[in-house]
Amino acid sequence: MKFFVDTADIGAIRDLHQLGVVDGVTTNPSLVAKSGRDFKEVVAEIAAMVDGPVSAETVALDADGMLAEGRELAKIGDNIAIKVPLTWDGLKACKTLTDEGRMVNVTLCFSANQALLAAKAGATFISPFLGRLDDINLDGMELIQDIRTIYDNYGFETEILAASIRTVNHMKEAALAGADVATAPPGVIHKMAEHPLTDKGLEGFLADWKKTGQSIL
Ligand code: G3P
């Protein structure tokens, strides 16, 4: 499973990039607002740092507007994936942008039927929002499983990009469900390395090492 980082925070991306765990980055208007940065400027910085796809979201509601914005964003770099919402106009824009050879991430997906339409429209990525389904007592992971089955049944090449990930369990379950990509906030990716038994074990080893009175260097 590929790891994308869901943030517009350059420092956080750099930190994870140095560890080699960043296969791409996703942003959305809320994350850009949170960064307080100029949208195109921050996306250009991210796209220059990371080799993989960097999702930049359009904000127009009509297909023509999305196409104009998408083409403008695509000028930033070859690794820009244009993000459009899963609306009828978003699907139209997806089809045209895909035909032009651009990567498209269809976002705000909450049903298997929406994912099926996005694949038919040629989406590079489909972004089902797990956490937001869980928020309203639905099962976000079941959606990933359904999309996986449907895409595999028909050989759709659209990649399932598990989004709205809130917990480390979401990461594990998305991997088990066969998501191609998971995009998570930096904090969730950091937490994946944590385990109380690791901390406890390390504490014990260091205490015993101290008793030997030795040093490695
Ligand atoms: O990738 C989409 C993501 O940013 C949405 O996450 O936590 O706002 O539902 P959240």
Image: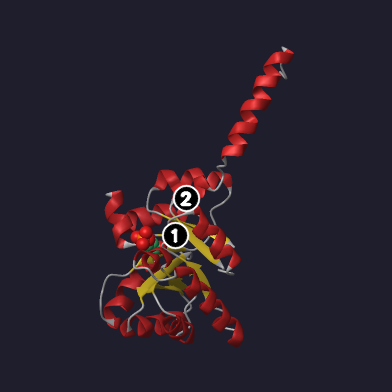
Residues packed near mark 1 inside 10 Å, few (<14), some (14 to 19) or many (20 plus):
many
Residue 26 appears in the rendering? yes
On the image, the x and y values in percent for residue 85 come to 34, 75
Indicate the amino acid at tag 1.
Answer: Ile
Residue 24 appears in the rendering? no
For residue 199, the mark is none
Marks counted in the figure total 2
Which is nearer the N-term, disc 1 or disc 2?
A: 1
On the image, the x and y values in percent for residue 123 come to 47, 78
Colouring chosen for the image of the structure: secondary structure
Disc 1/disc 2 C-alpha distance (Å):
8 Å
Residue at image coords 44%, 60%: 165
The N terminus - image quarter: bottom right
Indicate the amino acid at tag 2.
Answer: Val
Residue 130's quadrant in the figure? bottom left
Q: For numbered disc 1, what is the local secondary structure? A: loop
Q: For numbered disc 2, what is the local secondary structure? A: helix
Residue 135's quadrant in the figure? bottom left
| Image quadrant, ligand 1 | bottom left
On the image, the x and y values in percent for residue 174 come to 54, 64
Q: For mark 2, what is the residue? A: 188
The verdict on label 1 being within 8 Å of ligand 1 is: yes
Residue 179's quadrant in the figure? bottom right
- Is 39 on the left-hand or right-hand side of 217? left
Residue at image coords 40%, 47%: 10
For residue 165, the mark is 1
